[in-house]
Amino acid sequence: MTARTPRRAVDASRRTRQPTEVRRRLIAEAAVPLIAERGSAAVGVRDVAAAAGVSVGTVTYHFESVQEVLSEAMVLHIERYYGALSEAADRATRAAEGLRLLIDALFTDDTDRHWRMWFDYWNAGDRDQAFARGQAARYESWHGEIRVLVERGRDEGDFHCDDPADFAVRFAALADGLALQRLRQSPPLTTTDARRHLYRLVEVELEG
């Protein structure tokens, strides 16, 4: 038999590597549940590396700091969360139904994790201008989505509102306040009651 030539290890420079943006995304994805469970202040680079199944060096290669990882993870989660809400509302046959679906989705037994991340993101804006700019853009988009729903409902004859943009500010502010009360439970607030308060706002200001 002819002896086989031993296989040589593939040179490191020729190995298939995931693109940098893919690796960054995977690391940020792994950080999302950690932040939701513990809060960003309690998550370190070793925690992120362990969750992502990579070395600490891999994390620090792709991100300048753990704060940058947390920032990207929060933005990833928030954009995904509000994107899903918007899609659900857009699929509704009428705007009034879409707004009800949106309210229902804001407060469920699973959304406490989201609200913890949102307030973490909110608080980080006091320390980081990138966070602050991201918050401003997110709020502008969120207000715009509510305003468009109200305008659509007005065109369909279900809503009566002279200033949809002004209503959007009040709706978003009430949702944030209810979410904070829900998390702190001071005083106690159920998801059902949180929805009820938002339904009441819609009833009084848009349907009355």
Image (cartoon, rainbow, N blue to C red):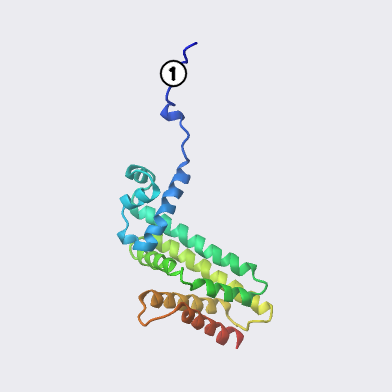
Residue reaching furthest top? 1
Indicate left or right for 151 with 48 as reference.
Answer: right
Q: Is residue 39 visible?
A: no
Where residue 203 appears, x then y in whole percent? 57, 85
Q: Residue at x 38, y 46 (%)?
A: 53
For this rendering, which residue is in front, 38 or 139? 38
Q: Secondary structure at mark 1?
A: loop
Task: Bin the neighbour count of mark 1 within 10 Å (Cα to Cα): few under 14, some 14-19, many 20 and up.
Answer: few
Residue 29: tell me if it is visible: yes
Say which residue label 1 marks. Answer: 6
Q: Residue furthest front?
A: 1
Residue at 55%, 63% in the rendered image: 84
Q: Residue furthest bottom?
A: 208
Where, by quadrant of the figure, is residue 176 drawn? Answer: bottom left
Front-most of 86 and 36?
A: 36
- Assign the C terminus to one quadrant of the image: bottom right
**Quadrant of residue 118 within the rendered picture:** bottom left
Q: Is residue 57 left or right of residue 15?
A: left
Residue at 38 percent across and 51 percent down: it is: 51
Q: Nearer the viewer, residue 19 or 4?
A: 4
Q: Label 1 is placed on what type of residue?
A: Pro
Q: Specify whether 140 is left or right of 40.
A: right
State the residue at coordinates (48%, 64%).
137
Percent of width and height locating residue 173: 46, 77
172 to 20, vertically: above or below: below
Q: Quadrant of residue 160?
A: bottom right
Residue 77 percent location from the top left of the image: 46, 60
Q: Measured along the vertical axis of the image, is residue 162 above or below residue 23?
A: below
User: Measured from the top left, where is residue 115 in percent x and y?
Assistant: 42, 69
Q: Is residue 6 left or right of residue 142?
A: left
Q: Report the number of numbered marks.
A: 1
